[in-house]
Image (cartoon, grey):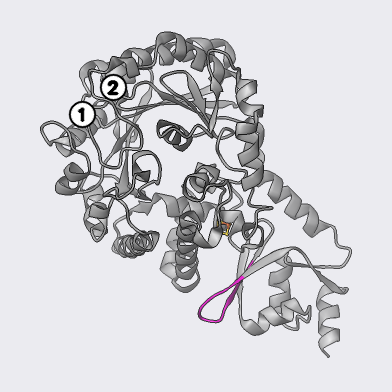
Amino acid sequence: MRQRLVLESSSGPLEHLPFRFERWADGRVLVTNMVGEHVFLTTDEFTSLAELRVEDPALLRTLRAKHIVRVRGEELPVELIALKYRTQHHRLADFTGLHMFVVTLRCEHSCGYCQVSRRTPARTEYDMSPETALAAVDAAFRSPSPQLKFEFQGGEPLLNMDIVRLVIRRATERNRTEGRQLAFVIASNLALLDDEVLDFADKYDVYFSTSLDGPRDLHNRNRPRPGRDSWERALTGIERIRKRLGDHRVSALMTTTAASLGRVRDIIDTYLEQDFRDVFLRPVSPYGFALRPRQRNGYDMSTWIDFYNEGMDYILDLNSRGIPVVETYSALVLKKMLTNANPGYVDLTSPAGIGIGALVYNYDGAVYASDEGRMLAENSDTTFRLGHLAHDSYETFMTGAALLDPLEESYTGSAPQCSDCAFERWCGADPVFHHATAGDYLGRKPESAFCRRNTAVFRYLLDRYSSDPRARELFRRWTAR
Ligand code: SF4
């Protein structure tokens, strides 16, 4: 009888296609295929899959539709998986789309979690020169990417607006013959925003990204400046940008410090009060100053996971009450989990996003594979320094061992533990993080805070998606953004 059912529904003997699995505490088993499509099975169903004795026609249909089994000799499932896999990696052909210009290390803030050796406003020797800026524009246009995003950061980029203006003008002029799609973003605390900057931003379609760590007391504690008015100045700047350029021209990011823990609802409420509908619950990063022993913003990843879980519970509750708000990182993960799209977020890509996703041009002409790689260099670790604009080319940056070795060694498709992990297709490789925290590009995943964070996020989202119809509908909406 068993044999007859299998033969009737499948027209031939079954065989496995590559899949990975993870057992859940409640006894279910998560099964994912080669392109990250997933299904939860009971223990009995999983046993029947493992032994290729699938008696339930509905289960068999699901397993075939998810490309977890095929009828021996069938080519179509393999071709479909190959097509989906290629689509997930199509961004690789474009190479570097994001070009970050560190136009100065100077800043009038002195944030405890600052990841670079920020310099006081008088130290102009830490400004990017016009020659370096123009060489960086040339390097950016060597990328074959049809979209080029120029992001200006520091320090505080508004302290070196002459170079920001020079880069944007040169890139715009050059693009008359290049025909790329250009975007310009200034990452600024907005404390020094003035009409002149707004006029320029208006003329060249410049966007702003700013920091908002939560309510006034928390933000001003995290982000000290003379006058202790960082929060007030940020909000004034946000309002001016919205009024002059439109709501969509400014976004905000928060960093979770030790002082933020236990205050996730206050933080989300502040975002809503300021009319931001996207909140990115970002852990503090372990680079630069943050690597110093006994630094005061440190906390264990399990504490951040509690913070994230409470924040997500609150966000789901707000949405169920008709107040739309999105957690940005979760939305990126869900896009990978529930669709075949790859949002290209650097922390969630493999091969890693360093170099091929973003390049960083430092004020002194050095080029880094990522902003985190530059932060390490500020602490004398130049592992991710790809070269110098004065004597190296884009081709040298992209083909040197400083980039290719970490890309190859951290690739999750072949890395120990990652290659067997049911979450691999949704996750990413982060060789800079693991180099900084474990001393090699791979790290040991059972001890990796990166792995713990992502595993916790994947588990939270899957639990809600599979058990709560309202969360399921909301998450589907988030993937459509
Ligand atoms: S880092 Fe962790 S969660 Fe991500 S693929 Fe590797 S083992 Fe899985």
* CB atoms of marks 1 and 2 within 8 Å: yes
Mark 2 neighbour class, 10 Å CA radius: few under 14, some 14 to 19, many 20 or more: many
Query: Which residue is at the front of the view, 260 or 431?
Result: 431
Mark 1 neighbour class, 10 Å CA radius: few under 14, some 14 to 19, many 20 or more: many
- Expressed as whole percent of the image width and height from the top left, the position of residue 317 reads 31, 65
Residue at the spot 49% in from the left edge and 57% down from the top edge: 448
Q: Is residue 70 above or below residue 190?
A: below
Residue at the spot 61% in from the left edge and 40% down from the top edge: 406
Query: Which residue is at the front of the view, 238 or 372?
Result: 372
Taking the image as drawn, is residue 476 in sight? yes
Q: Earlier in the sequence, mark 1 or mark 2?
A: 2
Horizontal side of 425 relative to 68 (left or right) equals left
Residue bearing mark 1: 191
Label number found at residue 85: none
Residue 125 drawn in magenta: no
Residue, far left: 227
Label number found at residue 158: 2
- Expressed as whole percent of the image width and height from the top left, the position of residue 154 reads 34, 27
| Residue 322 occupies quadrant | bottom left
Range of magenta residues: 22-31
Residue at the spot 21% in from the left edge and 30% down from the top edge: 237
Looking at numbered disc 1 in the image, what kind of residue is underneath it? Ala
